[in-house]
Image: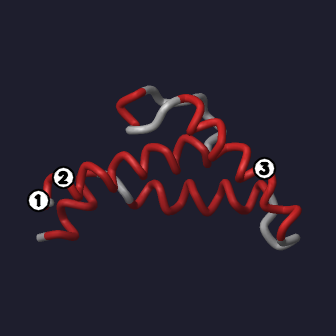
Amino acid sequence: MQQKDITLAFERLGVIMTSIGNEDQWPGYNSGITEAEFSLFNDLVEKQFFHNGWFTTENVRKSLLSLGELLTQTKLTNWFM
């Protein structure tokens, strides 16, 4: 796997994480996952509180948003250099 492939994979992950964090709709096939997979991920976020009370939906979304914002093409390219 080349650097550009790794960067693209992490960038797509960032799009997914940011979308879930913002409670956005499915970002489309460019995100690398289907709408059903996106819905499953979103449902998982909603259910985390039942497994661990510290993981409220709001806190999980905030964490995903913060981490997703770090996974942009610019930031990943700068990190690799």
Camera-nearest residue between 43 and 53: 43
Secondary element under disc 2, as helix, strand or loop, is helix
Q: Residues within 10 Å of mark 2 (few under 14, many from 20)?
A: few
Q: Amino acid at mark 3?
A: Glu
Residue 52 occupies which quadrant of the picture? Answer: bottom right
Across and down, in percent, residue 54 comes to 82, 73
Which residue is tagged 3? 46
Q: Amino acid at mark 1?
A: Gln
Q: Amino acid at mark 2?
A: Asp
Relative to 24, 5 lies left or right: left
Across and down, in percent, residue 57 comes to 78, 55
Where is 56 relative to 27, above or below? below
Secondary element under disc 3, as helix, strand or loop, is helix
Asked if the residue under mark 1 is in contact with the one under mark 3, i.e. CB atoms within 8 Å, the reply is no
Q: Residues within 10 Å of mark 3 (few under 14, many from 20)?
A: some
Residue 7 occupies which quadrant of the picture? Answer: bottom left
Where is 53 relative to 77, above or below? below
Which residue is tagged 1? 2
Relative to 32, 36 lies left or right: right
Q: Residue at x 81, y 54 (%)?
A: 47
Q: CA distance from mark 3 to mark 1?
A: 35 Å
Which numbered tag is attached to residue 5?
Answer: 2
Relative to 77, 48 lies left or right: right
Camera-nearest residue between 14 and 6: 6
Where is 36 relative to 63, above or below? above
Q: CA distance from mark 2 to mark 3?
A: 31 Å
Which numbered tag is attached to residue 76?
Answer: none
Q: CA distance from mark 2 to mark 1?
A: 5 Å
Relative to 1, 57 lies left or right: right
Q: Residues within 10 Å of mark 1 (few under 14, many from 20)?
A: few
Across and down, in percent, residue 18 comes to 52, 47
